[in-house]
Image: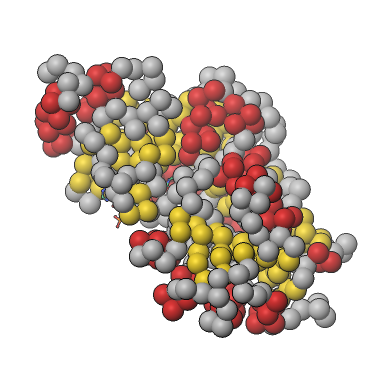
C-alpha cells in the first residue's frame, strides 16, 4: 500500500469548523481518532457525529471542550458524562432516519472517518462489521479518510468503497473492538423464557444485544425456522444459526438471508460474517425501513427498556434527565412489527434495577419516551407478560402491576387508584 500515510498525516486535512462523521460501534477507528484528538488541540469549531461507539472515547476528553463537540446520535458509555456536563450533544433520532438526514444535509458532513477491510483485487474495500449510517456518510462527505485494517472482515452486501475515493488512508493490523455481554441473572433467564414463549416457529426476529437479548436467544433453542432481520446481532445468534434454529427459510423478504446493519460481538461473530453469503449487511434506511419490516410475515421485535409507566409509556434512552443511550431502532421495529402480518413487538425489562422498581406510576422527571403508549404491545418482566394491545388505561395498569416486582405492587395499586386509573 504505497499511498498509506500515518494517522497524523491522514487527519492533517481536517480544518477548523469541519463536520466529521466517525465510524461507530466496534468499527471505531481508534488510531485515527487518537490522531484527530491530538490535531483538535490546535483547531476550533469541530463537530463530530457518531452513533453508539465502543472502546475508549478520546474525543470526549474535557481538554477538547470548546474545540471539538460530539454530536451523539446514540450515546455509548464513553460519551454519557460529556453529555451530562453539557460538553457534547445528544440527538434523539430513529436509526431509520439517519441516512436520509445525512443526504438532506440536516447532518452536514465535510469528512467521514471509517474503518475498512483490506481491498480486493479491483481496489474495493468493504465497510465490514458496521454499514448502518457509515455508508451514507462515505457517500455524502466530500473527504473520506480510512483505516484499512487487515483484521476487518469483508462482508456481503452493497456497501463498498474504492481506494480511489479515499482522500487518505492509514494501514493497521489490529484486533477489532469486541463486545461481551454480562452473564444472565436468574431474573433475566426467567424473563428470557417468558419472551421465548411469545415467539412462534417461523418468526422473523429483531433483537439487540446485552444480557436480556442473550437470555432470550438462549431460550429459543428448540424453535424451528426462525429468521433474522435486525439492525444488529452478536455471538448468541451464531449459536442459533449453527444449531439450525435460524434458517431464514420462512422469511417473506430476503429469504434465506440474515439481514443486519452492524454486528458487535467477539471474533466469533466477526469470523461468522466474513465472506458469508447468508448474511447481508444493509444500511439502516433499509434494515429499519417500516415498509421492509412490515413486509415480514410473523415479524417479532424484541427490545429492552429502562422504565415503563402504568399507562404503558416506555422510557428507553434516559435515566430521568440523564441521557443513557438513544432511540436507536426501537420505535422503527415496534411499529413495523405491529403492522406486519402476524407480527408483534415485545419490550423487556427486569422488574427492578438497583433495587428500584422500573414499572412506575409516573415516569421519572426528564425521562425520554421512546415508545409511546399508543404503540406499545407486549411488556415482559421476569414475572410475566402484560399484553397492552388496545387496552384502556385501567387494564394497562392492572396488567403492568401484575408483572411488577411483588414488593412494589401495593404501592403501584395505591398510585393507580389515586389517579383513578381503576377502582380498587
Ligand atoms: N432506575 C435506576 N437505574 C436504572 C433503571 C431505573 N429505572 N433502569 C436501569 N437502571 C440502571 C441499571 O441498573 C444499569 O446500571 P448498572 O449496570 O450500573 O447496574 C443501567 O441503568 C442500564 O440498565 P440495563 O437494564 O442494564 O440496560 P441495558 O444495558 O440492558 O440496556 C437499554 C437497556 C434500554 C438502555 C438499551 O436497550 C437501549 O438503549 N435501548 C434503546 C434503543 C433500542 O432499543 N434499540 C434497539 C436495539 S439496539
Q: Position of residue 84 (x, y in %)?
A: 35, 61
The residue lying toward the viewer, choosing from 158 and 142, is: 142
Q: Where is residue 200 in the image (x, y as percent from the top left)?
A: 49, 24
Judge whether residue 190 can be spotted in this image. Answer: no
Look at the image and name its color scheme. Answer: secondary structure
Q: Residue at the location (26% across, 45% down)? A: 365
Q: Where is residue 101 in the image (x, y as percent from the top left)?
A: 62, 47
Q: Where, by quadrant of the figure, is residue 197 drawn?
A: top left
Q: Position of residue 360 (x, y in %)?
A: 23, 36
Left of 66 or right of it: where is 115?
A: right
The residue lying toward the viewer, choosing from 311 and 199, is: 311
Q: Residue at the location (67% across, 47% down)? A: 104
Q: Is residue 191 above or below residue 91?
A: above
Q: Residue at the location (68% across, 65% down)? A: 111
Q: Residue at the location (44% across, 43% down)? A: 213
Judge whether residue 41 can be spotted in this image. Answer: yes
Left of 312 or right of it: where is 154?
A: right
Left of 406 or right of it: where is 327?
A: right
The residue lying toward the viewer, choosing from 194 and 362, is: 362
**How many numbered marks have been drawn onto this rendered protein structure?**
0
* The C terminus, quarter of image: top left
Q: In this view, does 371 lie above or below 134?
A: above
* The N terminus, quarter of image: bottom right
Amino acid at each position: 500500500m504505497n499511498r498509506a500515510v500515518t494517522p497524523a498525516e491522514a487527519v492533517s486535512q481536517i480544518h477548523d469548523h469541519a463536520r466529521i462523521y466517525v465510524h461507530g460501534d466496534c468499527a471505531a477507528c481508534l488510531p485515527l481518532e487518537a490522531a484527530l484528538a491530538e490535531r483538535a488541540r490546535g483547531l476550533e469549531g469541530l463537530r463530530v457525529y457518531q452513533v453508539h461507539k465502543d472502546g475508549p472515547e478520546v474525543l470526549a476528553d474535557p481538554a477538547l471542550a470548546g474545540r471539538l463537540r460530539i454530536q451523539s446520535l446514540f450515546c455509548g458509555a464513553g460519551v454519557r458524562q460529556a453529555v451530562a456536563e453539557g460538553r457534547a450533544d445528544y440527538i434523539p433520532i430513529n436509526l431509520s432516519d439517519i441516512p436520509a438526514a445525512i443526504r438532506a444535509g440536516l447532518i452536514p458532513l465535510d469528512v467521514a472517518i471509517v474503518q475498512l477491510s483490506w481491498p480486493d483485487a479491483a481496489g474495493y474495500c468493504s465497510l465490514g462489521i458496521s454499514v448502518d449510517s457509515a455508508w451514507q456518510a462515505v457517500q455524502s462527505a466530500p473527504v473520506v479518510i480510512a483505516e484499512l485494517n487487515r483484521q476487518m472482515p469483508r462482508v456481503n452486501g452493497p456497501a463498498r468503497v474504492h481506494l480511489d475515493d479515499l482522500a487518505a488512508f492509514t494501514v493497521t493490523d489490529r484486533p477489532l473492538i469486541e463486545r461481551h455481554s454480562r452473564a444472565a441473572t436468574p431474573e433475566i433467564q426467567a424473563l428470557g423464557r417468558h419472551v421465548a414463549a411469545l415467539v412462534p416457529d417461523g418468526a422473523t426476529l429483531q433483537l439487540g444485544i446485552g444480557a436480556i437479548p442473550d437470555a432470550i436467544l438462549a431460550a429459543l433453542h428448540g424453535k424451528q425456522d426462525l429468521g433474522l432481520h435486525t439492525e444488529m446481532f452478536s455471538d448468541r445468534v451464531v449459536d442459533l444459526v449453527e444449531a439450525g434454529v435460524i434458517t431464514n427459510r420462512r422469511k417473506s423478504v430476503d429469504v434465506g438471508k440474515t439481514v443486519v446493519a452492524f454486528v458487535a460481538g467477539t471474533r466469533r461473530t466477526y469470523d461468522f460474517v466474513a465472506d458469508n453469503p447468508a448474511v447481508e449487511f444493509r444500511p439502516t434506511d433499509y434494515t429499519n425501513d417500516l415498509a421492509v419490516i412490515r413486509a415480514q410475515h410473523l415479524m417479532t421485535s424484541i427490545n429492552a427498556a429502562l422504565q415503563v409507566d402504568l399507562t404503558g409509556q416506555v422510557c428507553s434512552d434516559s435515566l430521568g434527565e440523564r441521557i443513557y443511550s438513544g432511540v436507536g431502532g426501537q420505535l422503527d421495529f415496534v411499529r413495523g412489527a405491529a403492522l406486519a402480518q402476524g407480527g408483534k413487538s415485545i419490550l423487556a425489562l427486569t422488574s427492578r434495577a438497583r433495587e428500584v422498581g422500573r414499572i412506575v406510576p409516573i415516569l421519572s422527571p426528564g425521562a425520554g419516551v421512546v415508545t409511546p403508549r399508543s404503540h406499545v404491545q407486549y411488556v415482559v418482566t421476569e414475572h410475566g407478560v402484560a399484553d397492552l394491545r388496545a387496552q384502556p388505561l385501567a387494564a394497562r395498569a392492572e396488567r403492568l402491576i401484575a408483572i411488577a416486582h411483588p414488593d412494589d405492587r401495593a404501592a403501584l395499586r395505591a398510585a393507580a387508584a389515586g389517579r383513578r386509573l381503576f377502582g380498587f
